[in-house]
C-alpha cells in the first residue's frame, strides 16, 4: 500500500528558531490524518488524529484548531493500520520504544519511517506543552526553558500518536520514536516525556516515501541548519 510521510520544514529549522507558519492546518490535513508537530510561534503541541488537528495548550488542555492555524513544523501520514498488536504492562516510555523498535526490526523496518497510534489505558502520562513565543533566531531550547509547562495525567484513557524516523534522517526529524498524547475525550494532551501503559492496541504503518515542504520566504535561508546541537535536539524531545 503506497503511503508517504508529509513533513513541514525540518527539525533543525525549528530547533534554531524558525517558527513562522509554512502552511495552514487545513492544508496539512489534506496530506495526512495522523501525526504531530507544533504551531506558529511554538504555540502549543500538535496532535493530528482521525483527520482532526488539535492543540495541547500550556496547561495541558486541548482544543481543536481551525483550518487557518499556522504550522511551522509537522509530520503526518495516512494511517491504515497495516500491522496491529497489543501492548500490556509497559512501565515507562523507554519500554514502549524498545518494544516498538523490536517489532519494526522483525519486519526489516529500521531504515524506514513509521506512523503509529496506540489507543489504551494509561496509569500515568507525564507531558508538556508551551505558550507562544514570538521571536525568530531564538532557539527552541531557549523558548522551552522559559515557556514550557509540565503536567501529569493519572488513570486516563487516550491515544499516543507518533512517528518514527531512522538514524540516517537525523536533523530532518528526530531519530527514533516521537510521541504525543491526547485523551479519549479530546480535552487533555501534550508532548510525552514518560508514560505507564496498562494496556493498549497499536496500529502501525511502515512508510518509504517522504515529501518535505520547506519554507519559501527569504528568512529561512538565514539559518545555518547544520549548526543545531545535540543539546538543542535533546531539549526538544526529552526536556533535558
Image: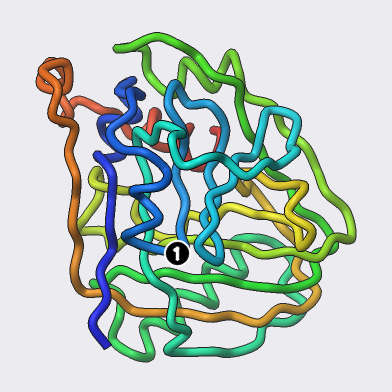
Q: Which residue is mark 1?
A: 33
In the shown orientation, is residue 224 left or right of residue 55?
Answer: left
- Say which residue appears at 85% left-offset and 62% top-offset: 123
Q: Position of residue 190 (x, y in %)?
A: 64, 44
Q: Up-down: is 56 above or below 180? A: above
- Say which residue appears at 61% left-offset and 26% top-offset: 130
Camera-nearest residue between 37 and 122: 37
Q: Quadrant of the N terminus?
A: bottom left
Location of residue 24 by image quarter: top left
Q: Quadrant of the C terminus?
A: top right
Q: Position of residue 51 (x, y in %)?
A: 50, 62
- Say which residue appears at 72% left-offset and 33% top-offset: 150
In the shown orientation, is residue 210 left or right of residue 84?
Answer: left
Location of residue 155 by image quarter: bottom right
- Say which residue appears at 26% left-offset and 30% top-offset: 13
In the shown orientation, is residue 226 left or right of residue 190?
Answer: left
**How many badges with numbers are in the image?**
1
Q: Position of residue 234 (x, y in %)?
A: 44, 37
Camera-nearest residue between 188 and 164: 188
Element type where label 1 sits in the image: loop
Q: Position of residue 46 (x, y in %)?
A: 53, 44
Camera-nearest residue between 120 and 97: 120
> How is the structure coloured here?
rainbow
Q: Up-down: is 157 above or below 21? A: below
In the shown orientation, is residue 2 left or right of residue 14?
Answer: left
Q: Up-down: is 81 above or below 198? A: below
Q: In the displayed orientation, state which residue is furthest to the top.
A: 135
Mark 1, other Cα within 10 Å: few <14 / some 14–19 / many ≥20: some
Q: Up-down: is 218 above or below 173? A: above
Amino acid at each position: 500500500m503506497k503511503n508517504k510521510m508529509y513533513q513541514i520544514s525540518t527539525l533543525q529549522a525549528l530547533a534554531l528558531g524558525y517558527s513562522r507558519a509554512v502552511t495552514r492546518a487545513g492544508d496539512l490535513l489534506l496530506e495526512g490524518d495522523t501525526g504531530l508537530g507544533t504551531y506558529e510561534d511554538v504555540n502549543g503541541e500538535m496532535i493530528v488524529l482521525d483527520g482532526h488537528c488539535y492543540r495541547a495548550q500550556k496547561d495541558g488542555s486541548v482544543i481543536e484548531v481551525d483550518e487557518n492555524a499556522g504550522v511551522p513544523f509537522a509530520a503526518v501520514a495516512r494511517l491504515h493500520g497495516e500491522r496491529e498488536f497489543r501492548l500490556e504492562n509497559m512501565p515507562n516510555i523507554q519500554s514502549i520504544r524498545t518494544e516498538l523498535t523490536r517489532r519494526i526490526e522483525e519486519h526489516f523496518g529500521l531504515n524506514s519511517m513509521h506512523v503509529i497510534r496506540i489507543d489504551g489505558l494509561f496509569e500515568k502520562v507525564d507531558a508538556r506543552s508551551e505558550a507562544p513565543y514570538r521571536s525568530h533566531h531564538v532557539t527552541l531550547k531557549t523558548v522551552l526553558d522559559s515557556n514550557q509547562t509540565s503536567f501529569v495525567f493519572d488513570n486516563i484513557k487516550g491515544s499516543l500518536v507518533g512517528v518514527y524516523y531512522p538514524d540516517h534522517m537525523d536533523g530532518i526529524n528526530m531519530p527514533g520514536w516521537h510521541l504525543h498524547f491526547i485523551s479519549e475525550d479530546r480535552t487533555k494532551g501534550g508532548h510525552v516525556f514518560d508514560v505507564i501503559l496498562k494496556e493498549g492496541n497499536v496500529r502501525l504503518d511502515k512508510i518509504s516515501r517522504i515529501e518535505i515542504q520547506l519554507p519559501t520566504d527569504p528568512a529561512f535561508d538565514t539559518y545555518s541548519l547544520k549548526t543545531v546541537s545535540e543539546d538543542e535536539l535533546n531539549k526538544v524531545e526529552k526536556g533535558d
